Image (cartoon, rainbow, N blue to C red):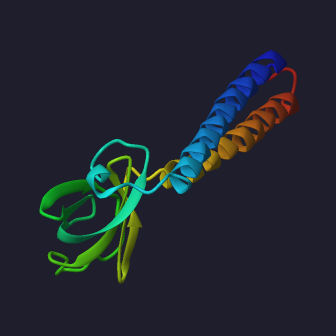
Amino acid sequence: MTTRKALLVSAGFWTFGVLLLVGSLYGSVGLDQFRHAPTCSPDQVFTATDCRVTVDATLTALTPDQVGIDVGGRQSSIEANLHGPLPDDAAGLPVRVTFYRGTAVHIKSGDLNFDTEDAPVDRTDELRFAGLFILIGGTLLVGILALRRSARPADSP
């Protein structure tokens, strides 16, 4: 690998890694907005208003990728990414559901305690980890390839 190619590839890794880190910064801003959001009034629970509230609900269904809840007679289906064993008799289980901007973001009851796919928490750590991995891993990969290339004898292809 020529020095010019190595620099171009390294610049690509650095650019992509920095973009991911900047994305994680904006994810942190979203998390801060969530934490400092004012409390919703009861009529704002299912609206896109910039507020949050925790309400009592009842589970109607629970699978690894979907959660069904009933909040005061209003049915809602929420995307989730659950791992591990789930209770067989989840239907009818009372839960506490945190809504933010009209969307369920956290569900808690006894042994159940998880964020939904819409929770602002999920995006921050993943982007930061990916950005750091790309920055460090890309730099190491380019460095190793450049060293291997420079260590070859002059007459080899």
Outermost residue toward the top in this view: 4
Looking at the image, residue 132 sits to the left or right of residue 77; the answer is right
User: Where does the N terminus fall, quadrant-wise?
Assistant: top right
x then y, percent, for residue 62: 21, 68
Q: Quadrant of residue 83?
A: bottom left
x then y, percent, for residue 150: 86, 29
Residue at image coords 34%, 41%: 48
Outermost residue toward the left in this view: 73
- Above-or-below relation of 98 to 130: below
Residue at image coords 29%, 58%: 42
Please state the total of marks drawn on the protein image.
0
- Above-or-below relation of 29 to 68: above
Q: Quadrant of residue 52?
A: bottom left
Observer-nearest of 71 and 124: 71
Looking at the image, residue 110 sits to the left or right of residue 143; the answer is left
User: Where does the C terminus fall, quadrant-wise?
Assistant: top right
Q: Quadrant of residue 18?
A: top right
Looking at the image, residue 8 sits to the left or right of residue 98; the answer is right
Q: Is residue 157 visible?
A: no
Observer-nearest of 136 and 46: 46
x then y, percent, for residue 49: 38, 43
Q: Is residue 93 visible?
A: yes
Residue at image coords 26%, 52%: 43
Observer-nearest of 151 and 98: 98
x then y, percent, for residue 70: 17, 64
Looking at the image, residue 157 sits to the left or right of residue 22; the answer is right
